């Protein structure tokens, strides 16, 4: 990325200070900017490359090109550069190298000499020369280029070997350095000729850690520049034998779009009493996050580490009360609720779901086997069979109706995996046969059947509520007003659990009989309590250890997740024009909006501005369409005339419970790909940050400076030995 103006002969960012503005994303506007600033040498660059790596300073735009309220800091959407020095002429080779510099550009740069050239009359020459780097910095820079490349491609720098020296000498890192030398890298060649030494494992680790810190610093700085953010964590992962909590930051960028960035891992190892403080300290002191700017948090709790994550969330709310605890909108409510229940039966169900999803993802032939089994169990209900087949082609185990679907197809599932395990036609390999057996054992366990029945019946009460939360703004607004009814239904079940459990138990027993599964108490419980089989009645056991705790947990979790501050944020969706038009007889409640009083430009004018906003959108013209989402509302041209509304809409947009799926799907998908595609022995917390954030613009000169300052005693960085 340039830190100076791309216009030839312009000294902004060097001799004087001017705000710099990215080239537009739009190809047509980007081309116009390029023509205006006379940079023919950049004509072959794509609009994406221009947007990422090139800037124009503010003095090339007239006053009317800026938004009036931003004091020259924000350009209008249709702004074009028009102010240029008459002596400016197009010059090639003046742009600082970026990631996208071609080999031809590089050779031209190397061949450039500091000589006087003939110029047309009245044109002054101002060839910008890159400062000379000493050889040590050039050498370290070459090492960092290799490290960043490995991180971007998710390639492990070293491979297992008998000892550290052999490991480094046979590493990918060394191979890439060898390749660069063969391609003519004179700096590497010279250093290799002078000192044929191996880089130690510690030194390579230092290079990777400095890259990680630099990329994280860039991410945190990007978030800071955009104001408020929310903290989002994912399910725990194990890296190098250590349980780690993946952390993401959710925010709204300058173009008013929701964005998510991966910032790193927090270790969950250590003393439980001090663990939460340690995690908070790492985020603030080591990562540089300003948690006072955090306005929301969402966590994907798992039963095995439920207490640790809950303690972390509670501590966040205690220290930063405005970090509202919410649900992550991209996760179905029912599945999220079940994931946090630390009961053996529930965890058996959730782990089996993961195995089922992974199993049928392996091959379309396995999917066909399941569909064939479904047809066999619904011979007289073709419509129902087709509906279930269609559902099974999706990620149904993560959906709102996961437990209901599981019970509808459980008999077909068992038939399918048993058939695969038998492998009579010798179609399946040993791994598939083994996986089929594991799923078969789980499905033929009465504990799983009983748990599915309980989860299905309890989460039926929260199903519509959860779907509304993932719907449009009007649906989410409706969900906030329906919570009381949902809680009332759950409490009614809790008060009459004896009656409800009797029905649930009968349903599970009938299904188990159809599947030829014996009804019994889990063997693990009998062994733990040294009780004989038959000494404890299954109906009583499952009531006390399953039905009662599941209902109580879901009631408690719904109250905790959707407490007053969270509900107020959901009710603030009444500011979305489509919701105002839907409920035009009632002005949005100012009491909910006052939750953001400390974060808006002028709380004193809130009432008047809110009324004007309501009047504007409460009357719909014929054929007129109003924005129906936060994103669409933020993109309105008129929203800048309502500064308080703009600030509140931006704050609502950083709430995890109101995130659109597309806004954070890319980053989360990169994270999942890294965790799924990287073998356990090669997973690295540092390299994961580099890989997932490969699109973050890295300043190699800055990385080198950080390294030299961090390790000032190391005058020389040994070159890895040639193989």
Image (cartoon, grey):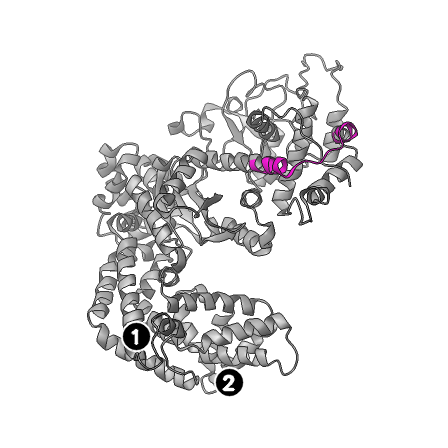
| Residue tagged 1 | 541
Q: Would residue 626 appear left or right of 565 to someone viewing this image?
A: right
Name the residue at 69% across, 49% down.
Answer: 162
Q: Position of residue 76 (x, y in %)?
A: 46, 33
Q: Position of residue 272 (x, y in %)?
A: 37, 48
Image: magenta residue range: 188-209
From the viewer's perspective, is residue 622 above or below residue 715? Answer: below
Q: Would residue 464 appear left or right of 707 to someone viewing this image?
A: left
Residues at marks 1 and 2, CA–CA distance in whole angstroms = 34 Å
Residue at the extreme bottom of the image, as rendered: 380
| Residue tagged 2 | 376
Task: Tell me the element at label 1.
Answer: helix
Name the residue at 68% across, 12% down.
Answer: 122
Query: Residue 219, labelled with which disc?
Result: none
Q: Residue 129 or 293: which is nearer the viewer? A: 293
In reply to whether residue 415 is colored magenta, the answer given is no
- CB atoms of marks 1 and 2 within 8 Å: no
Q: Position of residue 446 (x, y in %)?
A: 40, 78
Name the residue at 39% across, 86% down.
Answer: 513
Please identify the quarter of the rendering in which residue 171 is found: top right
- Give the quadrant of the C terminus: top right
Residue 628 seen by the camera? no
Task: Tell me the element at label 2.
Answer: helix
From the viewer's perspective, is residue 662 above or below residue 375? Answer: above
Please identify the quarter of the rendering in which residue 444 is found: bottom left
Q: Would residue 609 appear left or right of 212 to someone viewing this image?
A: left
Please identify the quarter of the rendering in which residue 428 is found: bottom right
Q: Position of residue 230 (x, y in %)?
A: 38, 43
**Most prominent secondary structure in the magenta stretch?**
helix
Q: Residue 177 or 720: which is nearer the viewer? A: 720
Label 2 CA crowd tier, 10 Å (few <14, some 14–19, many 20+): few
Q: Residue 92 or 278: which is nearer the viewer? A: 278
């Amino acid at each position: 990325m340039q830190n100076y103006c791309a216009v030839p002969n312009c000294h902004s960012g060097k001799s004087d200070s001017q705000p710099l503005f990215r080239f537009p994303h739009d190809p047509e506007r980007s081309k116009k900017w390029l023509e205006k600033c006379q940079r023919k040498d950049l004509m072959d660059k794509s609009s994406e490359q221009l947007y990422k790596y090139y800037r124009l300073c503010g003095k090339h735009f007239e006053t009317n090109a800026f938004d009036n309220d931003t004091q020259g800091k924000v350009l209008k959407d249709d702004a074009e550069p028009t102010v240029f020095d008459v002596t400016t002429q197009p010059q090639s080779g003046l742009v600082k190298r970026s990631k996208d510099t071609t080999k031809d550009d590089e050779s031209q740069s190397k061949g450039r000499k500091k000589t006087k050239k003939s110029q047309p009359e009245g044109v002054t020459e101002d060839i910008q020369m890159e400062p000379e780097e000493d050889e040590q910095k050039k050498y370290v820079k070459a090492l960092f280029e290799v490290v960043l490349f490995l991180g971007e491609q998710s390639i492990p720098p070293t491979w297992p070997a008998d000892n550290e020296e052999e490991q480094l000498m046979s590493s990918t890192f060394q191979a890439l350095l060898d390749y660069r030398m063969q391609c003519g890298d004179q700096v590497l060649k010279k250093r290799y000729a002078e000192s044929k030494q191996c880089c130690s494992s510690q030194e390579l680790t230092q290079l990777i850690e400095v890259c990680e810190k630099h990329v994280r610093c860039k991410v945190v700085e990007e978030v800071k520049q955009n104001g408020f953010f929310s903290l989002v964590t994912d399910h725990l992962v194990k890296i190098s034998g250590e349980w780690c909590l993946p952390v993401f930051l959710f925010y709204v960028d300058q173009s008013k779009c929701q964005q998510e960035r991966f910032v790193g891992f927090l270790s969950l190892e250590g003393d439980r009493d001090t663990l939460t403080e340690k995690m908070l300290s790492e985020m603030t002191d080591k990562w540089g996050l300003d948690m006072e700017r955090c306005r929301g948090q969402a966590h994907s709790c798992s039963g095995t580490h439920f207490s640790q994550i809950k303690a972390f969330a509670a501590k966040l709310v205690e220290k930063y009360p405005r970090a509202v605890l919410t649900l992550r909108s991209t996760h179905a409510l029912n599945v999220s609720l079940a994931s946090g229940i630390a009961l053996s039966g529930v965890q058996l169900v959730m782990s089996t779901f993961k195995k089922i999803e992974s199993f049928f993802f392996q091959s379309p032939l396995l999917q066909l086997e399941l569909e064939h089994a479904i047809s066999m169990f619904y011979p007289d209900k073709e419509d129902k069979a087709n509906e279930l087949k269609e559902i099974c082609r999706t990620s149904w185990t993560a959906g709102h109706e996961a437990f209901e679907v599981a019970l509808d197809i459980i008999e077909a599932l068992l038939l399918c995996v048993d058939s695969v395990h038998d492998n009579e036609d010798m179609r399946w390999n040993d791994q598939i046969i083994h996986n089929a057996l594991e799923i078969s054992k789980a499905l033929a366990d009465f504990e799983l059947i009983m748990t599915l029945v309980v989860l299905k019946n309890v989460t039926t009460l929260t199903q519509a509520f959860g779907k509304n939360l993932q719907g449009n703004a009007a649906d989410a607004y409706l969900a906030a007003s329906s919570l009381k009814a949902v809680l009332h239904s759950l409490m009614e079940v809790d008060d009459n659990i004896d009656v409800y459990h009797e029905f649930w138990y009968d349903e599970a027993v009938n299904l188990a009989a159809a599947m030829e599964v014996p009804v019994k108490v889990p063997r693990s419980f009998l062994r733990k309590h040294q009780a004989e089989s038959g000494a404890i009645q299954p109906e009583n056991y499952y009531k006390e250890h399953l039905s009662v705790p599941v209902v109580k947990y879901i009631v408690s979790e719904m109250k905790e997740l959707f407490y007053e501050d969270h509900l107020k944020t959901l009710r603030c969706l009444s500011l979305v024009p489509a919701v105002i038009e839907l409920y035009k007889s009632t002005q949005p409640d100012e009491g909910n909006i006052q939750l953001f009083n400390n974060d808006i430009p002028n709380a004193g004018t809130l009432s008047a501005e809110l009324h004007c906003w309501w009047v504007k959108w409460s009357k719909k013209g014929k054929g007129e369409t109003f924005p129906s989402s936060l994103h669409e509302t933020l993109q309105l041209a008129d929203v800048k005339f309502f500064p308080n509304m703009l600030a509140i809409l931006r704050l609502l947009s950083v709430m995890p419970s109101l995130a659109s799926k597309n806004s954070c799907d890319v980053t989360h998908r990169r994270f999942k790909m890294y965790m799924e595609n990287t073998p356990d022995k090669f997973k690295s917390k540092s390299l994961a940050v580099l890989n997932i954030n490969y699109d973050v613009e890295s300043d190699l000169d800055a990385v080198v400076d950080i390294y030299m300052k961090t390790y000032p005693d190391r005058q020389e960085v040994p070159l890895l030995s040639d193989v």
